[in-house]
Image (tube, rainbow, N blue to C red):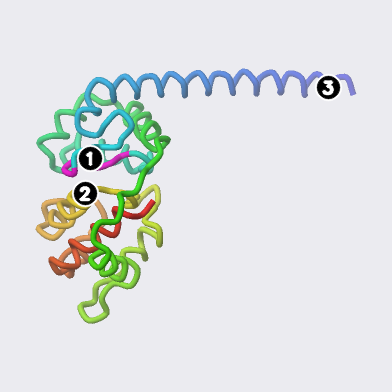
Amino acid sequence: MTDKKSLLLVGGALLALFSSVVRADASADLARAEEIVSGRCFLCHGLEGESASPVFPRLAGQHSEYIAKQLSDFKSGKRKSDTMKPQSEELTKAEMKALGAFFESKPAAARSLRDAELVAVGKYVFNRGNQFTGLPSCASCHGAKGYGSPLLPRLAGQHPRYIEDQLKQFNKRERTNDNAVMHTVASKLSELETHAVAEYIATLD
């Protein structure tokens, strides 16, 4: 009985030690992420990932795995960007993961409704697609609320301009680092549908 108690005590002590090391590493990673964000990322994406400019994506609430993958793709050149290439070149994998975790922890906010009729069209396309052109619904992959998954980006609350820009890049095959399904989807969207669905996505939270 005494031996069992000793083993339990030793095991508990080791677990506590391991947990404290993990917490310390997490704190160090977060501190490094904050340092990187305040040093460069904030210029385009904001200190909290809120991005005041419609040209640059909001990163607040985005999946950490997705952010880390995009940074890796920018670094390798798999995803083309004259802006992000130099920003990602010196980042380590650990720093990419830390930045992903940092931005995912930040609260995302929806944009206020501006054009109700246009948003209504966007909502229809987002949830039901267009059976006449073979356009699938956005919700079938990104979810009814646009939250996405670790492999697919959160869309909810994103800048409409940024969404439209990315759809155009997919349509022109200028963006090829993600799911090839998006090439087909983007090619089936009309200009009106693209604009409308982007406006609708911005209102999701």
Main secondary structure type of the part rendered in magenta? loop
Q: Is residue 57 magenta?
A: yes
Element assignment for label 2: loop
The residue lying at 31 percent from left, 19 percent from top is 35
Residues 92 and 158: in front is 158
Element assignment for label 1: helix
Q: CA distance from mark 2 to mark 3?
A: 54 Å
Q: Is residue 159 magenta?
A: no
Residues 122 and 10: in front is 122
Q: CA distance from mark 3 to mark 1?
A: 51 Å
2 vs 3, front mark? 2
Horizontal and vertical percent position of residue 139 = 36, 64
Q: Which residue is mark 3?
A: 5
User: Which numbered disc flags the more N-terminal residue, 2 or 3?
Assistant: 3
Query: Which residues make up the magenta segment?
Result: 54-59
Residue 73: assigned label: 1
Residue 107: assigned label: none
Marks 1 and 2: CB-CB under 8 Å?
yes
Residue 177: assigned label: 2
Element assignment for label 3: helix
Which quadrant is the N terminus positioned in? top right
User: Which numbered disc flags the more N-terminal residue, 3 or 1?
Assistant: 3
3 vs 1, front mark? 1
User: Which numbered disc flags the more N-terminal residue, 1 or 2?
Assistant: 1
Q: Give, as a three-letter code, the residue at label 1.
A: Asp
Horizontal and vertical percent position of residue 187 = 15, 66
Q: CA distance from mark 1 to mark 2?
A: 7 Å
* Residue 5 falls left or right of residue 107: right
Total numbered labels = 3
